[in-house]
């Protein structure tokens, strides 16, 4: 961006360019539009340009979502002087190429989860991020559910020893948008575009959440996957059908570095479940439980209390001292899904200004990718226990209650994306 004179005390701008503008693009746009109106930031995000292949559609998206300009080639986006941060909201097949090129071009990068379609691609991205870090650039993966205030609070409580050593973790992410066998074949059902099915789409989220909240990595898994409907009609109608080449559901158990056990379930075939993400941790001194469909609440059981009066209690996570809440509404006024993207933008802007690695880093994303690959390998070997190779400890330091950023951290069919 060209240097311009600023008013004394003015906050310098941060030009953002986004690739992709469907469901995730709209969610990220909401975060970028809102963040500086809610939080005091060291830099002010400016929605410089959005990119997509269809010139008419991307121009309409730019107008609708608040972007100043539109591009039809992501390479042109990278070449713009008014873009210092590239936000990647495309299908997984293009993550590696765009992210590596953006980092090599001197840009900061935010990339939607999962980091890539393969471990090899994720390794190349993590290596590019490491090279860029030396030049003062940052790269972050968009695991937005870390930014639910109740999830951040759960991480803080575990780190503070409120439930003692974690013994067992249960996580499930259930949706139902593929229950109808007549639902059309989209990119999310094609391995060459999506990498995997429910495993990468939903499983990546719950693997990251489990590791983040507990504060340690998975070191091995035993898994089963299944594809229930193997052919679907091609989008646009007609009698022509195409092959589904990804999993519809994944079930796996795992062992964390400490020896704690974990179980995971990811499916897009749970009739009646729209976006049901649930997590429970059982420790030596208590338990924590969370349900995304009640995302302002955290359930906590303190097992050190007398049995006659103990039990799960509901924590309403809306107090000013709770993570991220200092910028929002009075106590009791609930937040929603879209606020996680505002918090994500906040943490990333602070990391850029501080010159600090924002969690989750590309190295964290690579570690999740290795878990997903181990799940697929185990399922292919009749559920044989499979080690997660070279498992690096994710950046899971407990964030400060008031300033979480200091330690915490092309288009697709919108109807089909709307469940993620």
Image: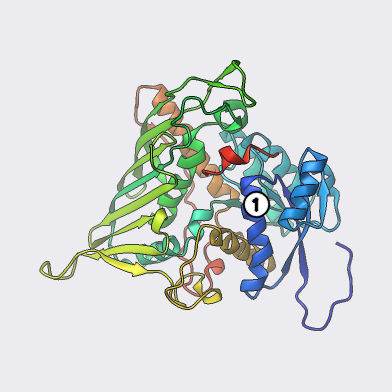
Asked if residue 103 is positioned above or below residue 253 in the image, the reply reads: below
Q: Regarding mark 1 in the picture, which secondary structure is present there?
A: helix
Identify which residue is drawn at 59% across, 30% down: 186
Q: Is residue 174 left or right of residue 301?
A: right
Placement of the N terminus among the 4 image quadrants: bottom right
Q: Position of residue 279 (x, y in %)?
A: 36, 51
Outermost residue toward the left in this view:
308
Q: Position of residue 16 (x, y in %)?
A: 75, 57
* Residue 108 x, y percent position in the rendering: 71, 55
Which residue lies at the image location 88% right of the left edge and 68% below the top edge? 3
User: Which of 383 and 239 lies nearest the eye of the viewer?
Assistant: 239
Q: Nearer the viewer, residue 44 or 380?
A: 44
Residue ID at (77%, 54%)? 63
Name the residue tied to disc 1: 26
Say whether residue 147 is left or right of residue 112. Answer: left
Residue 244 appears left or right of 384: right
Picture coordinates of residue 259, whole percent (x, y) = 30, 47
- Say above or below: 360 vs 383: below
């Amino acid at each position: 961006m060209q240097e311009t004179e600023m008013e004394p005390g003015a906050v310098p701008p941060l030009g953002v360019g986004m690739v992709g503008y469907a469901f995730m693009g709209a969610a990220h746009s909401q975060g970028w539009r809102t963040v500086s109106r809610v939080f005091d930031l060291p830099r002010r995000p400016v929605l410089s340009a959005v990119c997509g292949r269809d010139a008419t559609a991307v121009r309409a998206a730019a107008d609708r979502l608040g972007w100043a300009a539109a591009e039809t080639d992501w390479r042109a986006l990278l070449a713009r002087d008014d873009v210092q941060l590239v936000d990647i909201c495309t299908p997984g097949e293009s993550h590696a190429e765009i992210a590596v090129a953006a980092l090599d071009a001197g840009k900061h990068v935010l990339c939607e989860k999962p980091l890539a379609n393969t471990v090899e691609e994720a390794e190349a991205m993590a290596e590019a991020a490491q090279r860029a870090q030396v030049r003062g650039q940052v790269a972050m993966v968009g695991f937005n559910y870390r930014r639910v205030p109740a999830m951040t609070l759960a991480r803080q409580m575990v780190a503070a020893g409120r439930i003692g050593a974690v013994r067992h973790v249960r996580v499930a992410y259930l949706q139902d948008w593929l229950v109808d066998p007549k639902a059309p074949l989209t990119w999310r059902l094609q391995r060459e575009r999506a990498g995997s099915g429910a495993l990468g789409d939903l499983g990546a989220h719950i693997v990251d959440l489990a590791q983040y909240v507990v504060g340690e990595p998975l070191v091995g898994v035993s898994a089963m996957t299944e594809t229930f409907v193997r052919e679907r009609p091609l989008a646009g109608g007609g009698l022509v059908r195409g092959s589904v080449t990804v999993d519809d559901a994944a079930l796996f158990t795992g062992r964390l570095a400490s020896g704690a056990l974990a179980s995971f379930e990811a499916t897009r075939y749970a009739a009646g479940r729209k976006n049901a993400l649930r997590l429970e941790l059982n420790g030596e001194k208590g338990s924590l439980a969370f349900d995304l469909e009640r995302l302002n609440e955290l359930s906590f059981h303190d097992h050190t209390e007398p049995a006659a009066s103990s039990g799960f209690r509901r924590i309403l996570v809306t107090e000013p001292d709770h993570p991220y809440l200092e910028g929002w509404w009075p106590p009791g006024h609930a937040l929603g899904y879209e606020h996680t993207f505002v918090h994500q933008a906040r943490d990333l802007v602070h990391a850029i200004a501080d010159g600090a690695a924002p969690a989750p880093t590309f190295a964290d994303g690579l570690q999740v990718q290795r878990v997903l690959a181990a799940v697929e390998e185990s399922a292919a070997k009749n559920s044989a226990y499979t080690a997660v190779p070279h498992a690096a400890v994710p950046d899971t330091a407990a964030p400060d209650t008031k300033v979480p950023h200091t330690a915490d951290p092309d288009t697709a069919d919108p109807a089909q994306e709307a469940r993620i």
